Image (cartoon, grey):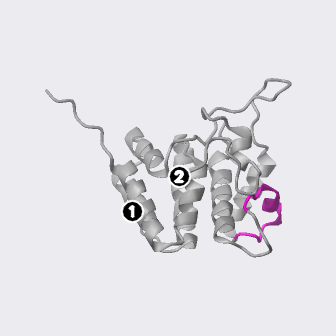
Amino acid sequence: MSPGPLEEASSGAVRYWDRYVSARGTWRLHPVSRQPMEPPGEDLAAMRAGLAHPAGEVFALWPFYTAPCDGRITRRLEAEHAALALYGLHQQSRREPMHRPGVGFGAALARLREGGRFGAEALDRRVDTAANATSVASLRHRLRGLVTQLRTGGQPLDYNRLLEDLHDWHLPERRRRVRRKWGLEYYARKSEPQS
């Protein structure tokens, strides 16, 4: 299960998006000015630089990592790297927070589909292609296009949950659970009222 809105990462540090977004999915307020605290554009640019590189290769991302590191690139660090890079892409040029606690990846895509801005069949194909990725690198590449669509549609998602899903993608049994969860969220239809 994903951590709560302000639950600390295993190293004791608060994840980047939780520094700025409250449990309600709104910007946190500065303690003195009471103005919304939005992430600096240069932070988001540094995160987006991670889209084209594996974990650990973009020096500007190191201050944002919370995963424990003993000099080796771990699955946790790879997952956090991917989540940070995707968050940087998702939050780019958006005034509202694109991290929303409790909104799973499949549910966010379902809301995007229901919005009608993108063709349902084309979106279904992209979701299917992502869900059938067999490596984290391939999944990260496929999620990039979907996150771009989520950004365009203004649809947020829970980045703590996505980070956990990315971490679980490394192991076949956990990958199957993530696929099942995304599929159930994406294809769940509200039942028609009984007459």
Q: Is residue 92 left or right of residue 41?
A: left
Q: Amino acid at mark 2?
A: Met
Can residue 120 be found in the magenta stretch? no
Q: Residues within 10 Å of mark 1 (few under 14, many from 20)?
A: few
Q: Residue furthest right?
A: 32
Residue 117: x percent and y percent? 43, 42
Label 2 residue SS:
loop
Residue at image location 53% in from the left, 65% down from the top: 168
Where is 192 relative to 135, above or below? above
Q: Going 65% across and 40% down the picture, which residue do you hit?
A: 94
Query: What residue does disc 1 label?
Result: 128
Q: Which labelled disc corresponds to residue 4?
A: none
Q: Residue at x 74, y 37 (%)?
A: 38
User: Pointer 2: what residue?
Assistant: 1
**Which of the 4 image quadrants contains residue 73?**
bottom right
Q: Are marks 1 and 2 in contact (CB under 8 Å)?
A: no
* Three-letter code, disc 1: Asp
- Binning the other alpha carbons within 10 Å of mark 2 as few (below 14), some (14 to 19) or many (20 upward) gives few
Report how far apart the C-alphas of labels 1 and 2 lie in the structure.
23 Å
User: Which of the two discs, 1 and 2, sits closer to the camera?
Assistant: 2
Percent position (x, y) of residue 152?
Answer: 55, 45
The stretch of residues the image draws in magenta is 55-67
Measuring from the top left, give residue 138's x and y in whole percent. Answer: 53, 71
- Can the viewer see residue 189? yes
Q: Earlier in the sequence, mark 1 or mark 2?
A: 2
